[in-house]
Amino acid sequence: MTLAPRITLNDGHSIPQVGLGTWPLDDDQAAAAVVHAVEAGFRHIDTAVKYGNERGVGHGIRASGAERADLFVTTKLDGQFQGNDRAVEGLEGSLRRLGLDYVDLLLIHWPLPSRGEYVSTWKTFERLQAEGKVRSIGVSNFKPAHLERLMAETDVVPAVNQIQLTPAVTRTAEREFHARHGIVTESYSPLGGSGAGILDAPVLARLAGKHGRTPGQVVLRWHVQNGLVTIPKTANPERMRENLDIFDFELDPQDLAELAALDEGPGAGNDSDVTGH
Ligand SMILES: NC(=O)c1ccc[n+]([C@@H]2O[C@H](COP(=O)([O-])OP(=O)(O)OC[C@H]3O[C@@H](n4cnc5c(N)ncnc54)[C@H](OP(=O)(O)O)[C@@H]3O)[C@@H](O)[C@H]2O)c1
């Protein structure tokens, strides 16, 4: 069984570098997936209010027999709970559904800049962290401009920004910004998501053949070699083991140069000034 190495966050806590994504699993599927994932070596589970599967994730955690302290559980506050201290209610609902008394990481799911509530939401996050209901606080889908404003108007620098990121959507400027400010970049949809993704790219077949791995493993290796935390989703136990089995090979500079050809440039990926929930 492989355990992912942990990366230290700016608040002193640490996060396993590979976690299990759970969208779009329902409660029953999520419960089974979490049990299989813990068996496979996953210690980091990613959910959200929006996914509607926090209850299932909680069942899976209890059924897995894992010690709570060994697990890293992330959930994300839905937009309906932004502003006016509603994050308190939002987190309480998540803890109740998960059956936990704290989460390891609470994220603002989307900045929703036109609503103008992410700064006040973050101030509530700071309080929830001080009260111990959440160990680490972070954001998701924030652009550097949103982070600039957050950091100018509040006290705690987010530990993590979880953003869409793949070898095709590289978000280089965003990653550099995060690194300058001590924010860990976490890549979601790391395999390109469930639609027509990047896994069929010929370069991935070539590199998979060269290293005796699968295209998915090559892509996940690219993420970890770039210092990213990543959360591939699968409910398939075989693929779970595959997605963790990426710590005993290395992409060389030539491989990385070939993968760079997949990069679709700075405009690729979603734009959280116009989308979000
Ligand atoms: N913060 C946000 O706004 C946000 C947005 C989207 C996603 N997320 C999080 O990120 C997680 C991952 O993103 P995602 O689910 O969009 O996409 P993803 O993890 O990039 O891709 C999931 C797809 O890849 C397949 N897959 C998994 N492992 C594979 C492997 N080794 N080889 C080939 N195919 C493989 C899965 O199929 P099977 O399931 O059939 O194995 C599924 O169709 C989500 O589950 C969620 O937790 C966050």
Image (spheres, grey):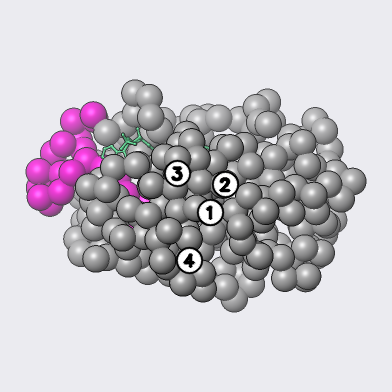
Residue drawn at 18 percent across, 30 percent down:
202
Query: In the image, residue 258 lies at what x, y percent?
Result: 24, 41
Q: Which residue is denoted by mark 3 in the rendering? A: 30
Which is nearer the N-term, disc 4 or disc 3?
3
Disc 1 marks which amino acid?
Answer: Gly
Measured Cα–Cα span from mark 1 to mark 4: 12 Å
Q: Which residue is denoted by mark 1 in the rendering? A: 58
Q: Is residue 202 magenta?
A: yes
Measured Cα–Cα span from mark 1 to mark 3: 9 Å
What's drawn in magenta, residue-wise? Answer: 200-224
Disc 2 marks which amino acid?
Answer: Glu
Measured Cα–Cα span from mark 1 to mark 2: 6 Å
Disc 3 marks which amino acid?
Answer: Ala
Does the rendering let one see residue 263? no
Ligand 1 location (quadrant): top left
Query: In the image, residue 193 lies at what x, y percent?
Result: 40, 33
- The secondary structure type at the circle numbered 2 is helix
Q: Is residue 122 left or right of residue 173?
A: right
Q: Which residue is denoted by mark 2 in the rendering? A: 54
Which is nearer the N-term, disc 2 or disc 4?
2
Disc 4 marks which amino acid?
Answer: Leu
Task: Kindly indicate whether the residue at mark 2 contacts the one at mark 1 (C-beta within 8 angstroms).
Answer: yes
Q: Is residue 167 left or right of residue 50?
A: left
- The secondary structure type at the circle numbered 1 is helix
Q: Which residue is denoted by mark 4 in the rendering? A: 71
Mark 4 vs mark 3: give the one in front.
3
Quadrant position of the C terminus in the picture:
top right
